[in-house]
Amino acid sequence: MPELPEVEALKDFLVEHLVGHEIVRVLPVAVSVLKTYDPPVTALEGGEVVAVRRLGKFLDVATGGGPHLVTHLARAGWLHWRDRLPDGPPRPGKGPLALRVALETGAGFDLTEAGTQKRLAVYVVDEPLRIEGVARLGPDPLAEDFDERRLADLLSGERRRIKGALRDQSLLAGVGNAYSDEILHAARMSPFKLASSLSPEETHRLYEALRGTLSGAVERSRGVAAGRLKAEKKTGLRVHGRTGEPCPVCGDTIREVSFSDSSLQYCPTCQTGGRPLADRRMSRLLR
């Protein structure tokens, strides 16, 4: 799933390639992709793009005097830029293409989604806060005013494990499964630790890891073409998706805990005092 750093890089890319250009056609291909109907997608046509923003994991393309095109790429969605779009309208079918946006220059982009779970979401709205997912977003962890005290206040009273708290978009906007693993590894913290139990020193470590991991990933992604961002993300990850590999810090074997629809990765030596965490799915299989 694209998270804050990748969506930030896509935003920068689209600022460069979209702002100042006219949208001449918006072509939904997959019926499931559009989550709004008023205003219609045709309200975007003829509008000049005046701004592109990142709102958590959402991308907001604003037209002058007109509606916003807001996208959430979900788990398997992606944006593909085309310097020259194919001639003729795309054919609806079973392929990954979900929506196409064409500019007056002949360039534009396609939104695609792989797999069978269709969660890619596109909204056409007069105000992004009309979208429930945007309205409930917590603070952006890379915002200038997001300081250590703000993080401590957010975690105070949180009875959830820190892994789940970091992924909650209403608590912090933009962090998902991959970067929460990376942040907790950098903070030398167990993903199962209760969020409310952090000491001031642990909160400091978490804050430094949060800001450092995300800002580092943003910098690595800056200037990378949209089509290469997924590969760039994978090369920068130290523990997420690297089960069985040696930890780059201590050399211990990276372990995994599996859930019904996701998994987390961690280093026992760096994060849990050398103790492997219980993997409930494996425990059930071994009964």
Image: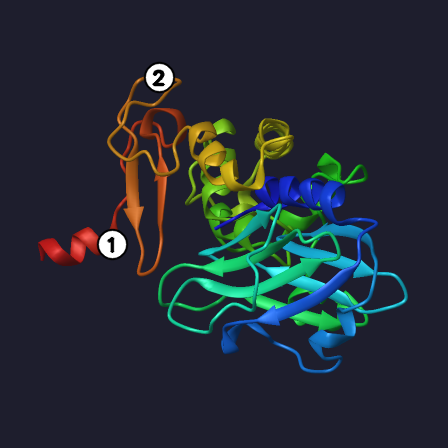
Does residue 118 appear anywhere in the picture? yes
Disc 1 residue crowd, few under 14, some 14–19, many 20+, Cα 10 Å:
few
In the depicted view, which residue is nearer to us: 106 or 32?
106
What numbered label is drawn on residue 250? Answer: 2
Amino acid type of disc 1? Arg
Identify the residue shown where x is 52% and y is 38%. 229
253 versus 48 height, above or below? above
Name the residue: 31% across, 61% down: 260
Q: Residue at x 76, y 69 (%)?
A: 44
Q: Are discs 1 and 2 less than 8 Å apart at CB?
A: no
Vertical order, 150 against 268 (above or below): below
What residue does disc 1 label?
280
Residue located farthest toward the left when viewing the structure as drawn: 287
Q: Quick check: 246 left or right of 114? A: left
Measuring from the top left, give residue 207's x and y in whole percent: 63, 33
Judged from this view, the residue extending furthest toward the bottom is: 38
Nearest the eye: 128 or 178: 128
Q: Answer with left or right where residue 66 lies relative to residue 205.
A: right
- Specify the amino acid type for callout 2: Cys
Question: What is the total number of numbered labels drawn onto the structure image?
Answer: 2
The picture places residue 244, in percent across and down from the top left corner, at 24, 31
User: Where residue 74 sits: x, y (%)?
Assistant: 51, 59
